[in-house]
Image (cartoon, rainbow, N blue to C red):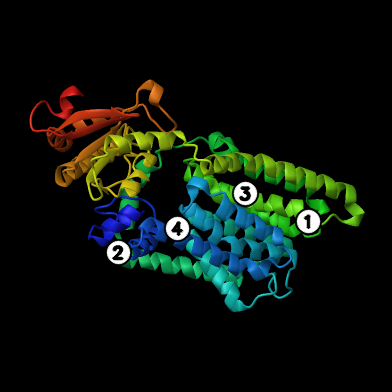
Amino acid sequence: MLDAARRMLAGERLYTDLIDLNPPFVFWLSEAAVLAGRLGFDPADVFRVIVIAILLGMLALAWPLTRDAKAIRAAFVLFAFALPLGHFGEREHLIFGLMLGYVVMGADGADEADEADGVGVGVGVGWRIAVGVAAGVGMAIKPPVGLVAVVLTLYLCVRGRSLRPVLRVENLAALGTLAAAFVAILVFEPAYLQAVQAYGGLYAEFSRGTPRQLLFRDIYPLSVWLALVVAAVTVASVAASRRVIALALASAAFLGAAVAQGKGFGYHYFPAMGYAVVTLFVLAAADVLPARRRSGMIRRVLAVTALVLVLALPALVAVERFAGKAGDDVVERRALSEALDDLGPGSRVAIVSVRLADAYPILLERRWEHVLSMPHVWFTGLGDEGRGKDVEAALWRRVGENLREGAPEAIVIRAPAPAERTRGDVAADYLEYLCADETARAALAQYGKAAHASGYDIYRPRQSGAGACASS
């Protein structure tokens, strides 16, 4: 995001010069961090501060709604600030915070219904508008999370046997925010809709998972299922049972939003896992009712056990990172960085890989300029036939044009040996794809293989000898 924002401020156009299929709002937020960087600050540090400020603001917005639910506050602080790990600053990390007030308001509305409109009481209209606007921003960043609003509103309607919750202030504010966001796209970034139309069909095939994989792939979705099971078995022993149900439903809806994207990337599940943790915290902390002492104690044991299972892995990773233990991605990135140690800040580099992590964060760490229009070649091998093949060919042609016009000082191509393959690698010869395009082949004629470092082939400009495509 920061690299794209820097290039946007330099005059390149999002969705035209820079190809991406996400709405522009986080790019605009990143531009603020880059502008601050011109005052002498590190843009990455500024962006981190912005993210933390947003999350703290969302906690403050939900504060009066959680006076009797300190477990919600504790769970939010833990998951938003202590355990985001590699997902810090992702859209889903922001969404987890932006939707907090709305989810809690929905839970409170379910727990202490106001006779007038079935909404939780205790805050004024202005506060509820702010909650709705924040939720609307979250939905604008990732439209599939609108499913959360649908599920919580439907729950309130069923509970109250009325359609009045549809017109809650929060819903109207969120809807208004979405409308404003759509108008902003039409006015400032109309090319976004064209990019979605041109590339959306092909992108839908990228890293597509089956429903079974997406629903049960690892601890991310499994944490939601675990929270749902514990909630279903023990909710009767909680006085604020409707709050627990609403929180569990929100977690399930976030899971549905992640599955709707069809990719199964870990960060897509971050809000779902986060609200599963919130649900389990509430179940673990809720008072044991005298009339249900035994079932209440069982609830606490089950909730705490579930929390241990859900948080053990992220906690272990956090401890290992704090202790300085490097993961495979860090080891790879370090080897590549050392192989290109002579390239200083501002050096032009092209990194060709289907894995986004191959380009970021190394580009930001070394402050290199990426010459490609897209951060990763996600379209590799997707266009098997028909229009998809034509779109993929056009994108590879764009890569060739970027190489010709950008004249990078180094071209890094992911080419792991069998023993070097890690998660995210695909069985693809990127050099073969490049050399199949006339423009890319002409650009690569000026480059020769200089080194191989931890799964990457590095090509540098050369004055004589066969070009890179001679060996493909």
Say whether disc 3 or disc 1 marks the residue closer to the N-terminus.
3
For residue 444, which quarter of the picture? top left
Farthest residue to the right: give it: 291
Indicate which disc residue 252 carries.
3
Q: Which residue is mark 4?
A: 48
For residue 342, which quarter of the picture? top left
Q: Amino acid at mark 1?
A: Ala
Q: Which residue is mark 1?
A: 286
Measured as percent of width and height from the top left, residue 65 is found at 67, 68
Q: Which residue is mark 2?
A: 38
Say whether disc 1 or disc 4 marks the residue closer to the N-terminus.
4
Measured as percent of width and height from the top left, residue 328 is found at 44, 33
Say whether disc 3 or disc 4 marks the residue closer to the N-terminus.
4
Sort mark 4 into few (<14), some (14-19) or many (20+) by Cα contacts within 10 Å: some
Sort mark 3 into few (<14), some (14-19) or many (20+) by Cα contacts within 10 Å: many
**Label 1 to label 4: alpha-carbon separation:** 34 Å
Q: Quadrant of the C terminus?
A: top left
Q: Nearest the camera: 307 or 332?
A: 332
Measured as percent of width and height from the top left, residue 190 is found at 31, 61
Label 3 or label 2, whichever lies nearer to me, is 2
Q: Amino acid at mark 4?
A: Arg
Sort mark 2 into few (<14), some (14-19) or many (20+) by Cα contacts within 10 Å: few
Say whether disc 2 or disc 1 marks the residue closer to the N-terminus.
2
Q: Amino acid at mark 3?
A: Ala
Label 2 or label 1, whichever lies nearer to me, is 2
Label 1 or label 4, whichever lies nearer to me, is 4
Label 1: element kind: loop
Sort mark 1 into few (<14), some (14-19) or many (20+) by Cα contacts within 10 Å: many
Left or right relative to 127: residue 93? left
